[in-house]
Amino acid sequence: MIKKCLFPAAGYGTRFLPATKAMPKEMLPILTKPLIQYGVEEAMEAGYDVMAIITGRGKRAITDHFDISYELEHQIEGSSKEGLLKEIRHVIANCTFTYTPQLQMKGLGDAIHKGKVLVGEQDPFAVILADDLCVNLDGDGVLKQMTKLYAKYKCCIVAIMEVPAEDVDKYGVIEGSEIEEDVFMVSNMVEKPDVDKAPTNLAVIGRYILTPDIFSMLENTKPGKNGEIQITDALCEQAKKGMVVAYKFKGRRFDCGSVDGFVEATNYYYNLEK
Ligand code: G1P
């Protein structure tokens, strides 16, 4: 079973300035819960219990969130407010959290590579980008769906969705052949292609299951789009060997890295709770 889930969380979150000047973007709340906690709970549902977080400067709030706050806990003990800590207490009691910094912002591929010390080189692991908030009310969460697929294909799995043709330049895009319903054997991947050059409109979203040989691929990956080390480029090398499967997941994804997506997610969860 795969137990470790990596959370690249070193980015600056410039689209949310000034909110993210001193606060990590992963701590922005949808209603009362920070984005990264949604991600951690999705991983727990899929059976993961080691959460490996790639941090950066100014990210202390993430570490504090997944730690006991003695003073606060003592203050509200026995009061009507105590119930509000139920979920986070459950998370803390059932997971191990590990951290390492990404010293320079050299891209998602570099961030994932930094995770090698946390997840090791023996086992496959998952990656969640917390600002892609995924929800599936009708059944398994997205990472759980992917983890089941991993058991069948035993290779890298990426989550994909169809996006409008004019949006493909915001994503990693795959090309491949459908081998079963909603499952594609990937033959090519391009990071943020020009709209008129994209092979398809099948966009990768922030959920991956990676086999540990991705680390040696990343060591040989040259800076790509925007001068950054791209996970898409390392995965493309795997894809050429028939080792990447793309999965059109069941559920919804909100791009909480953008203000529009963030507001949409907020409204969605608000209406659910009402
Ligand atoms: C990253 C990846 C991209 C992927 C996207 C999903 O881009 O590089 O391939 O499609 O996440 O959210 P970013 O949004 O960090 O620029």
Image (tube, grey):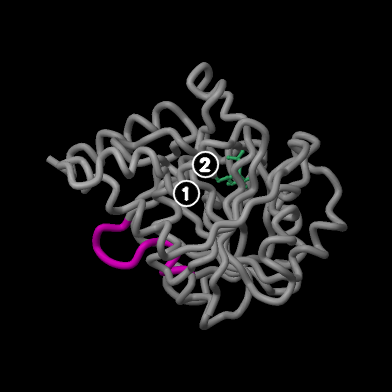
**Is residue 177 among what the camera can see?**
no
19 to the left or right of 239: left
Q: Residue furthest top?
A: 18
| Relative side of 72 to 22, left or right | left
Instruction: Name the residue nearer the viewer: 19 or 96.
Output: 96
- Give 101 or 142, whichever is nearer the viewer: 101
Residue designated by label 1: 66
Task: Look at the numbered disc 2 and give the secondary structure of its residue.
Answer: helix
Query: Which span of residues is magenta-colored?
Result: 136-146
- At label 1, the amino acid type is Phe
The yes-or-no answer for disc 1 within 8 Å of ligand 1 is no
Q: Write down the residue under mark 2.
A: 62
Residue at horizontal 51 percent and vertical 33 percent from the top: 25
Specify the amino acid type for callout 2.
Ile
- Residue 131's spot in the image, x, y percent? 48, 41
Indicate the quadrant where residue 13 lies: top right
Is label 1 in contact with label 2 (beta carbons under 8 Å)?
A: yes
Q: In what element is the residue under mark 1?
A: loop
Image x and y of residue 178, in percent: 52, 70
In the rendering, at what x and y percent does residue 205 appear? 52, 50
Q: Which residue shows up at 53% across the image and 24% down it? A: 20
